[in-house]
Amino acid sequence: MLRVLTLATLFPDAVRPNFGVFVERQTLGLAALDDVAVQVIAPLGLPPFPLTLHPSYRALSALAEREVWKGLPVDRPRFLNLPGTQGRFHVGALVRRLVPRLTALRETFPFDVIDAEFFFPDGPAAVALGQRFGVPVSIKARGADIHHWGHTPATAAQVRAAGRAADGLLAVSQSMADDIAAAGIDRPVRVHRTGIDRSRFGTVDRFAARARLGITGQLVVSLGALIPRKGHRIVLDAVAALPGVQLWIVGGGPDHASLAARIAELGVGDRVRLCGSMPHGDLPDLLAAADVMALASASEGLANAWVEALASGTPIVIPDAGAAREVVTTPAAGRIVAREAAAVAQGIAAILLQPVDPAATRATVDAFSWERNAVELREHLAGLVAARH
């Protein structure tokens, strides 16, 4: 039996059910294997009192510290998140909080390996904990954990040190592995791609989904957190230049007000909708109903929105960021364009003028599988344990 301690600051909870759903899905797949047992540690970084009285932090503070989440045992220990310090002290605070928790845990769950699911602060904390408890450590890179934390002066040295000290490294794409090297971590990295829930994505009838959602015209969906890096404003400006085309922007975040103001300024409120956050369970209908999924991200690892759209038979229009060239490999998958409104508009228009067979689009992501993801992760972690012994 392989006993895995999954350390993931990026993990869903009752307050944020969409937060890190891909980590949740990967962990569920790993735990479903017959010869694997998993314990999840999903720490919550909270500021000192009285900042915890803010509604968002108050809701997180009220979460249970231990629960069973979709069949997974999950601990949610709190650690101190000091505002204004740019993450400089996250790792130390997290390690101090977890040492007594893991010491007690080993009485009933003598974990063999620590699987850190985000490079910061999970990675450096996992390395320190692995050294203390004498177990190997794997760290996975997903995108912003390297692109941001790996280059921010307050945390870059911690990221590099952890990457060099870990027993194994994973990345969601080859481009992400290259970005790890560019951050100053020059060592082998195993590519470990995400999966797709094929019981949900790719099984929805497009016309039935459009009827359920009340969609009658051409629809573009832009899916992701409402933050500047995701480029929703670029897609908005692009669709504004395409008469009659509708746009649904799905996600929550601080850019909501500025996007609403831009919609009013452009006078496209009759065909652009800010949908807010949407449960992950509603995405199969939405992506099946759309004609195009456009996301103008400045940086990505390998966006789940890309592969879920393709699995739904919906082409994508994206900039040349992250693993774009590993996903958009044929015209059936969509277009890679410059990160500017005119180019995005041209890419969308090209797909709308010459629609492709949804089956051909779905075939572009045949290699993405949660079953394969779980088996490869188990093989990777077991290999680290065997090498240590």
Image (cartoon, helix red, strand yellow):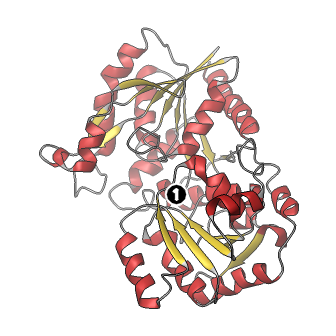
**Residue 149 x/y as whole percent:** 42, 56
Q: Can residue 319 be seen in this snapshot?
A: no
**Residue 205 x/y as whole percent:** 78, 55
Figure check: 321 above or below 156: below
Q: Quadrant of residue 209?
A: bottom right
Residue at the image position 28 percent from the left and 49 percent from the top: 56
**Residue 78 x/y as whole percent:** 29, 34
Q: Residues within 10 Å of mark 1 (few under 14, many from 20)?
A: some
Residue type marked 1: Gly
Q: Mark 1 points at which residue?
A: 184
Q: In this orientation, which residue lies closer to the viewer: 20 or 149?
A: 20
Quadrant assignment for the N terminus? top right
262 left or right of 64 in image? right
Residue at the image position 77 percent from the left and 83 percent from the top: 350
144 left or right of 308 in image? left
Q: Is mark 1 on a helix, strand or loop?
A: loop
177 left or right of 310 in image? left
Figure check: 113 above or below 320: above
